[in-house]
Amino acid sequence: MSTQPKIAVHGVGKSYDGAVVLEGVSLDVEAGSFCTVVGASGCGKSTFLRMLLSQETPDRGAILLDGEPIPAEPTEDRGIVFQRYSVFPHLSVEDNLILADEFANSPRLGRVFGAKRRAMRSTVDRTLEAIGLAGSRKSYPSQLSGGMQQRLAIAQALLKKPDVLLMDEPFGALDPGTRVDMHALLLELWRERGMTVFMVTHDIHEAFKLGTRVLVFDKRRHDPHAPQRYGATITYDLPLDRRETSPVPDARDLITTPNDT
Ligand SMILES: Nc1ncnc2c1ncn2[C@@H]1O[C@H](COP(=O)(O)OP(=O)(O)OP(=O)(O)O)[C@@H](O)[C@H]1O
């Protein structure tokens, strides 16, 4: 069995206009991991995610995907879900999912026919049931609640069957009840598909509930006279045994503030 990590990050750093955002970020992630990413606002979590998607390039260091340098452009095998719904407003619920599935099955043409099309219809039907939108299949996104739109966005990303799913606060705008439903759906699909997931969240309980590994981003060094001099890195990398209920630490013990140093 190969022990090659799915994603390997070696000494990655990133600055914007002279301000260091990330420095010395290194980690190996095995396929099928569910990494949750937490840290103070503005510490570079989204920047890190955008680098994994190739929407952003590191200034230094390297990122490897399956042992090879990560492709320079975003690719279909790396799906992304943002906090705000990224669905097509001019397509119905059903057509949004059909389009995602067509691209997964025929990335060049975006169209499938015959038996493949019938199989795709049944996948879309099952997905509509799973996300509780079967009764709204003909509705347009503007006719759905925020929670329903976000469920559609997540289902759309999952139907593309990405190898690596990148999620930036995907549940941030949802009410607590819908959040719990979406957690269950995401965990079910993650287990079924064996995807490698990175999810940024501000909710430490969500991080510990969903993750098999919690990554805490924070600054190791602070210069009070030049706050932009140092960037954040991974200060805690906490593997979780999901068979046990791990106690959730107090976030204040994990994330320091400049006054702590
Ligand atoms: N394209 C860009 N150009 C200039 N500065 C940027 C750019 N993208 C991010 N930044 C800066 O980098 C820093 C980190 O931003 P990032 O969005 O990665 O943080 P974050 O940890 O995800 O924050 P939040 O939790 O508030 O979403 C911020 O100071 C931000 O202003």
Image: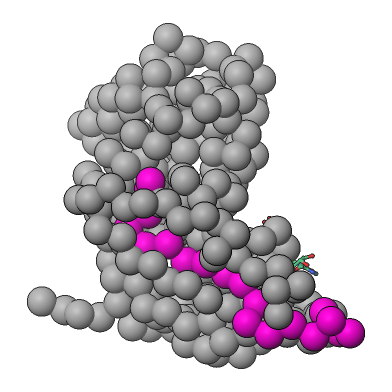
Where is residue 88 drawn, in percent x and y? 60, 33
Quadrant of the image for the C terminus? bottom right
Counting every numbered tag in the picture gives 0
* 93, above or below 53, in the image: above
Q: Quadrant of residue 195?
A: bottom left
Q: Residue at x 38, y 67 (%)?
A: 238
Query: What range of the chain is rendered magenta?
Result: 209-227
Q: Quadrant of residue 35?
A: bottom left
Q: Quadrant of ligand 1?
A: bottom right
Looking at the image, which is closer to me, 201 or 140?
A: 201
Residue 55: in sight, yes or no?
Answer: no
Name the residue furthest top: 135
**In magenta segment, residue 150:** no
In this rendering, position of residue 127 left or right of residue 61: left
Looking at the image, which is closer to me, 8 or 225?
A: 225
Where is residue 165 drawn, in percent x and y? 42, 54
Where is residue 127 drawn, in percent x and y? 33, 28
Q: Residue at x 35, y 34 (%)?
A: 185
**In magenta segment, residue 220:** yes
Where is residue 206 drawn, in percent x and y? 46, 45
Looking at the image, which is closer to me, 77 or 175?
A: 175
